[in-house]
């Protein structure tokens, strides 16, 4: 099965977990998400990947050796955790958790629906 982007969305979402994550900055895949007022239940985690790259002014504030280690394992408040999921409606979405704090009073990251995907069936 070949999965390709169908449309970019790029909107914030709320997520719900059956069991709250142990680590706030490494939450794992949610069980449901709320997008545009509709609850979508996740029935399958198709893939997961992590981008620990530093962006903007944060991209150049570390020594090269430390930056290389941080790119492999991440550092607090930096990076994104991506989850490709299938919902109960059969749709496939890429969601991500942005680990960056939003401000002094809001040190948690935020969840976003990145894009909707399309699964092409292989023909033989």
Image (tube, grey):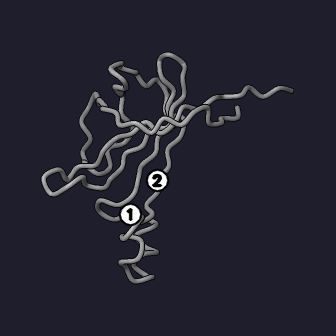
Residue at disc 2, secondary structure: strand
Q: Is residue 68 above or below residue 109?
A: below
Residue 43, given in percent of the width and then of the height, sits at 46, 23
Q: Which residue sits furthest left?
A: 105
Structural distance between the alpha carbons of marks 2 and 1: 9 Å
Disc number at residue 84? none
- Residue lying farthest to the right in this orientation: 124
Q: How many residues crowd mark 2 within 10 Å: few (<14), some (14–19), many (20+)? A: some
In which quadrant of the rendered view does residue 30 lie?
A: top left
Residue 3 at least partly seen: yes
In percent of width and height, residue 4 lies at 65, 36
Quarter the N terminus occupies: top right
Q: How far across and down, in percent of the image, does residue 36 sit?
A: 36, 23
Rendered image quadrant of residue 13: top left
Q: Is residue 46 above or below residue 38?
A: below
Q: For the residues labelled 2 and 1, say whether their Cβ atoms are less than 8 Å apart.
A: yes
Residue at image x 49%, y 32%?
85
In the image: residue 64, left or right of residue 75 = right
Q: Indicate which disc residue 74 carries.
A: 1
Looking at this rendering, what residue extends furthest in the top direction? 89
Residue at disc 1, secondary structure = loop
- 7 and 109: which one is in front? 7
Considering only order in the chain, which callout, 1 or 2, is on the residue closer to the N terminus? 2
113 is higher (above) or lower (below) than 88: below
Corner quadrant of residue 28: top left
Instruction: Tell me if mark 1 has few (under 14), some (14-19) or many (20+) residues whose alpha carbon lies within 10 angstroms of its own.
Output: some
Q: Residue at x 46, y 75 (%)?
A: 68
Q: Nearer the viewer, residue 96 or 20?
A: 96
The residue that appears at 29% across and 51% down in the rendered structure is 25
110 sits to left or right of 41? left
Specify the label residue 50 is tagged with: 2
105 versus 123 height, above or below: below
């Amino acid at each position: 099965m070949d999965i390709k982007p169908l449309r970019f969305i790029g909107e914030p979402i709320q997520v719900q977990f059956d069991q709250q994550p142990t680590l706030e900055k490494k939450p794992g895949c949610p069980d449901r998400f709320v997008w545009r007022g509709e609850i979508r239940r996740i029935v399958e985690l198709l893939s997961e990947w992590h981008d620990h790259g530093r962006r903007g002014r944060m991209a150049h504030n570390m020594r090269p050796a430390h930056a290389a280690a941080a790119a492999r394992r991440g550092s607090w408040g930096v990076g994104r955790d991506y989850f490709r999921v299938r919902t109960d409606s059969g749709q496939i979405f890429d969601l991500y958790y942005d680990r960056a704090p939003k401000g002094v009073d809001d040190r948690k990251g935020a969840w976003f629906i990145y894009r909707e995907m399309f699964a092409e069936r292989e023909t033989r």
